[in-house]
Each structure stands twice: as C-alpha cells, then as structure tokens.
Image: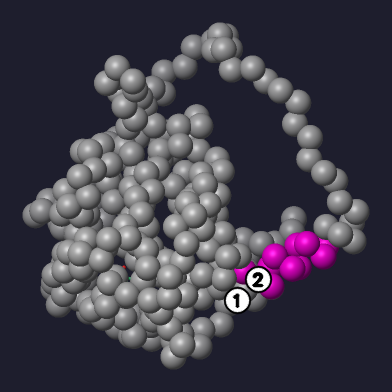
Amino acid sequence: FGIEITRRFSHEYDPARQLDLERDEDENQGVSGGPQSFEDMTEHIPYRLKKYTEKETFRRAVEFYRMMDERRTVRHFSDDAVPLGVVQTLIKTAGTSPSGAHTQPWTYVVVQDFNLKCQIRKIVEEEEEINYRKRMSATWVKDLEKLRTTWERNVLDVAPYLIMVFKQAYGVGPNGERINHYYSEISISISVGILLAAIQNAGLVTVTSTPLNAGPALRTLLARPVNEKLLLLLPIGYPAHNATVPDLQRRDIKDNHGSDVM
Ligand code: IYR
C-alpha cells in the first residue's frame, strides 16, 4: 500500500518516475512494427447507417443534448427496485464502446446482494475516512466542499445495484495465454461514458465514484482475478424523493476553447 499511496499522492513531479509509470502502461506493449499483412481471418463486411435529413439530424442532436443536460451526479438514492434485465441492457450498451484493438478490456460486475453491498460499504468507508483525514491534501478536501461529499457511503446499501467497473490489465485466452490489451484505461473511460448516457436515457441515476485504495480489498471480496483492477463503483437506481444536487453550471460552449471550430 505504501508505494501506491506515494505514487498517487506525490506532489512533486518526478520525470524519471513518470517515465517508469508510462513504461508500465499497457499501451506501450508490442510497439515494434513490421509490415502489415492482414493475415487474420476477420472478414470485412459492408457498413450501412440510416442517413437522416438535416432537419432530423438537428432534432436528434438537440433532443439528445437536452436529455444529457438533465444528467446529474446524484448521491441520494431510493431503494426502489430496478429490473436486473435493465441493468444488463445498460451494460450491453456500455459494451458497444470502441476499445484498443477491439480487446474490450473491461469487466462489469453487478452486485445486488444486500450483504455484499454492506461489506462493500464497510471497505469503502474505512478507506475513504483515511482518504479524507490523511491522504487527500487540504486543498483537495476544500475543492470538494461545494459537492458536500464525505467519507460516508450510505448509498452503497440503499441503491438496488452497484456496478463495479474493472480494468483488465491483460486478457487471458482459452488456454491461459496472456492477451495484450492496448489503451485499456481510455477504452474503459469511453465505455463508462456510454454507460452514463444509457443510465440517463433509462431515467436512472448514478454517482461516478472512484474508491481510492479500496480496490484490492474489493477485488478480493468479489473474487476477481489479479489481472483486474477496480476503476469505478457506480451505484444504480432512482434518486431519493428528497435528493438534492449542488447548483452547478456547465461551461458555455463559447468559453470552451477545445470546442472551437477552426
Ligand atoms: N474518491 C472519493 C472522493 C471524491 C473525489 C473527487 I475529485 C470528487 O469529485 C468527488 C469525490 C469518491 O469517489 O467519492
């Protein structure tokens, strides 16, 4: 644990260490090139997509934006039931994500069992209490004040489901052979983005929580293999009837230099 904490919380930027970390990254495997031969057996098939009129394209874009603009991170859940089939469909939607070399390097674990949810809550709260008290900098804790987050996690045993998102550092083939994964973390980030859109579309809510330092204990609790690392914990359900959210504003597209049209 010591090393993990120093790496994550070191305030000094150490280029040598940074290089080391980058070298560990899955995306740097197999960089050696060579001529392409396309010898694999994957057939390429025609792709057709319905083309909407310009008016319809506009309407759809605006409608989807309006729906997504209603999305908020919610920290107050109702225990109202959600059919498991809905959650499975949301995860199937997340699985439509692109991924490095189509390796689909994610594992979505759904927890429904109340006792398991209580154990998860205990593990997460124990670590979060230390995070808030010691590991996070004073500035970090101050920056979070407007969100009114604390180390407490009562949502974890109220929400009907917890979706645990694991990154597969590498895959394991049918004969136990290792399969390289590329760009796993960005692939999973894209997949989870799609999941968030699907959750919103279904009229459900989540909080994109990142359980700091609780990963190994949760991986053990859920009996996940060592190649899987917990990245996110997403409670899924309906908002509590008295749920509140901070009155935050989104950045206007005009202030968003990244969205400039060149
Ligand atoms: N990791 C904790 C705390 C937290 C951190 C940030 I940055 C937030 O924007 C919100 C919470 C958690 O996942 O709740």
Q: Provide the secondary structure element on which disc 1 rests.
A: loop
Please state which amino acid type lies under the numbered disc 2.
Met
Residue at image point 35% right, 34% down: 26
Please state which amino acid type lies under the numbered disc 1.
Glu
State the residue position of label 1. 70
Task: Give the x, y percent position of residue 66.
Answer: 69, 73
Residue at image point 44% right, 47% down: 188
Q: Is residue 21 above or below residue 43?
A: below
Whether pointer 2 and pointer 1 mark residues with C-beta atoms closer than 8 Å, the reply is yes
Residue 128 picture quarter: bottom left
Q: Indicate the colouring scheme.
A: one colour
* Region of the chain picked out in magenta, as a range: 58-68
State the residue position of label 2. 67
* Residue extending farthest left: 2
Between residue 118 and residue 185, name the one nearer to us. 118
Q: Provide the secondary structure element on which disc 2 rests.
A: helix
Magenta run includes residue 203: no
Q: Is residue 20 above or below residue 116?
A: above
Residue 135 picture quarter: bottom left
